Amino acid sequence: MYKDGSADAQDIAFQALDESSVAVDDEVRKVLDMISANGPWIADYGTVLDRNVRGMQVPATSDVLARVLADLSRETIRMSEHNRELQLQLAASSVRITKLSRALSSARAGIGRDPLTGLNNRRTFDATLRRWIRQAYGEIGSTFCLALVDIDHFRLFNETHGRQSGDGVLRLVAKMLTEYVRGQDVVARYNDDEFAILLRQSDIESSYADMRRMCSQLAAQKLVSKRNGQAFGSITMSAGVACAQVAEDAATLIDRADAALQAAKQGGRNRVC
């Protein structure tokens, strides 16, 4: 489980997904039951029509015609009233299904998101990376790079300033990374104080330059506690960048990006390799 309790949050998200799925299934079954229950009504109405049609095929007196018309009128009114009731029930069920579908979509989204930062979580990142690799093999020019980012000395910051301040730093970094990437790129919380960025249609030089700007932007910010105005000074991050190569799997690409990240940290931190 992550230190921020995100594993517990994921359990809650899965439970919400299960509950929403069951609720939608129950409501759909109710609709099917309504439609099925309407079958006998239609059959009865058909029987009345058939009976009266046969009665009209022989010479009939005015009294017979009156009875036929009265019978048809009565059954038509009864069927119409039943249909109105069914329509109301179906309309109400449609509203409930719409609400449940929204809850289901929300639950699904929760499973793919990190609860603290709102970024994509590790599960979503892994799935996206595998998809991008497949696309890179099948599409000419579908290149991308992977950047792994680690907040420098984050454990020490947490021990010095407290967990809540550390959570604030994680949200700050997540916000900054999201603002700096392009709409086609993907940012995820990879593990605790580590983030992953997938940079679409990017080569190693431009990806390095992008990450260098992000590092400089973070280092330039002076952090202050919202609770008591305490100055935290500045915080930095290190990054490792690797670009996808032909016939390379996800694990190999991640290992190369992580090796670059470790080189950046060993080289003095607040840098990109």
Image: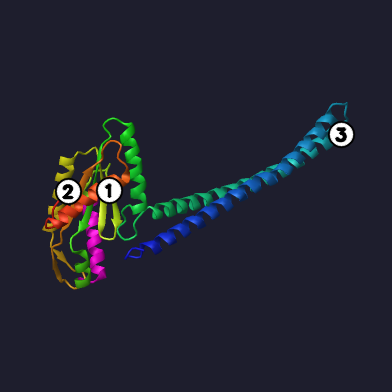
Chain part drawn in magenta? 161-178
Residue bearing the label numbered 2: 211
> Was residue 171 drawn as part of the magenta stretch in this picture?
yes
Q: Residues within 10 Å of mark 2 (few under 14, many from 20)?
A: many
Circle 2: residue type: Met
Residue bearing the label numbered 1: 254
Q: Is residue 18 left or right of residue 205?
A: right
Look at 43% across and 58% down and name the residue there. Answer: 13
Look at 26% across and 36% down and name the residue there. Answer: 143
Q: Point out residue 112 in the picture as x, y percentages from the top left corner.
A: 38, 52
Name the quadrant of the N terminus.
bottom left
Circle 3: residue type: Val
Q: Is residue 32 left or right of residue 50?
A: left
Residue bearing the label numbered 3: 64
Residue 77 is at least partly visible in this image = no
- Is label 2 or label 1 in front? 1
Look at 17% across and 48% down and name the residue there. Answer: 211
Q: Nearer the viewer, residue 44 or 6?
A: 6
> Was residue 251 drawn as part of the magenta stretch in this picture?
no
Q: Is residue 63 left or right of residue 120?
A: right
Q: Point out residue 230 in the picture as x, y percentages from the top left corner.
A: 15, 71
| Element type where label 1 sits in the image | helix
